[in-house]
Image (spheres, rainbow, N blue to C red):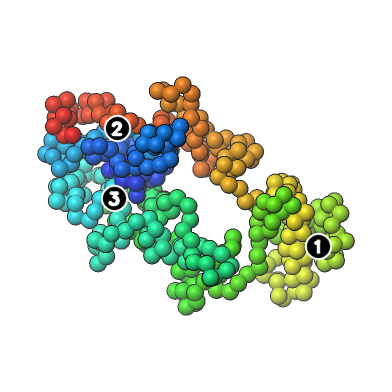
Amino acid sequence: MSALQETRIVELASERIAWAGKLMGDMGADVILVEAPGGDASRGYAPFADDQEGGESLYFWHYNTSKRSVVLDLEKTAAREAFLALVASADVLIESEAPGRLAVLGLDYDDLVKVKPDLIHVSVTPFGRESSRKDEPVTDLTIIAGGGPAWSCGYDDHSLPPIRGGGNQGYQTASHYAVMSALTAIFHHGVTGEGQFIDLSMHAAANITTEMASYMWLVEGATVIRQTGRHAMPMMTMPVQIQCQDGRYATTGMPPRTPAGFGALYDWLDELGLVPRLPEAIFLDNARHRESIGFADIGVDDEVTAAFSAARDALQLIAENSTADGFFEGAQKINITVGAILSPEEAFENDHFVARGYPVEVEHPERDAPVRYPGAPYKLPASPWRISRRAPALDEHAEEIFGPLGVDAATLAEAR
């Protein structure tokens, strides 16, 4: 049984919250996507299936799995009546409408609880509904830059500007908080029977997802600086991205944390014939005989300091003399956390991800063969994750959804 089975989510279509609906749909919720006439704009976003410009959007496919689609023009009375019937059957509403629009339509929280008193209503807006900035226009770029994460993203060369991560990470961050909020509210409802209204600020969600940046400023008054492939910190730290023998890159990650780990690293170095090239390797061999070893002793215990320094040098030396995959696999065997830096295409075919069942095939009944999708972001053995259906065609499920709610065909025709 999936985690959210028998939970109905109504999602007012918006690319800002599409990821939230997908996450809950793939957890088993019945997610009903309410689109305006003509469909959500993201149906027209590139890239397209079979490279057919203007055809079926792979973007829309990805963000709208496990959902059903209906079309309602909420500017029309018939559509608002149908929407109220839909909400009355639901557990959660997620939306990213402009502040004030739902109130004008008579469809805001105070109106909706008249038909569904225990409704959980998650409103996702750029700055929160009551902010003085609530009416400012935004894009994903301005959310991720104004919220702070972009400040920490980039390279050691600070003549280069900050960079924006790939994908709509501002929207996706807000969607993650929307899901966490909804799950918390569902749990609260399970205990108390009460619903609630949740006012979620995309800007705030981005700002508290700056890792240490906001914390450093608020507590230390310090400003972090961006660094290639590692944590943004107030001071420059040691590089960790190494070009490997095959020209690809790996990140040397974290050194060992136990005496046995230091010993295993020494043995790996020895196996590759690299000990003579690192005189400091003796500190790794010495560390294996200690009772304990830890970060807290760096700078306090000279032997510990030397061991950690030698470990970083050893990982760098091994990476330079290995393929990226060989470095990653060798480190896994001795339980040291490192990474090979993969392109999206490489990650999709990577043995580790394939073994975990990450790529999954989704049936598209109108096509000759299933389509491969990115799969489960986590494993919940007792409540499995799965894509239950491909993204819906526009208005594909109107009759099967509204029929049981007593909304007849004539009303639906008026509502579009």
Q: Which residue is tagged 2?
A: 394
Mark 3: few/some/many CA within 10 Å (<14, 14-19, 20+): some
Q: Which residue is tagged 3?
A: 96
Label 2 vs 1, first from the N-terminus: 1
2 and 1 marks in contact (CB < 8 Å): no
Report the quarter where the N terminus lies.
Answer: top left
Spatial separation of the CA atoms under disc 2 and disc 3: 20 Å
Label 2 vs 3, first from the N-terminus: 3
Residue 249: x and y in percent read 66, 54
Label 3 vs 1, first from the N-terminus: 3
Q: In the rendered image, which quarter is residue 253 located in?
A: bottom right
Q: In the rendered image, which quarter is residue 416 located in?
A: top left
Give above or below for 320 relative to 66: below
3 and 1 marks in contact (CB < 8 Å): no
Residue 317: x and y in percent read 77, 59
- Residue 62: numbered disc: none
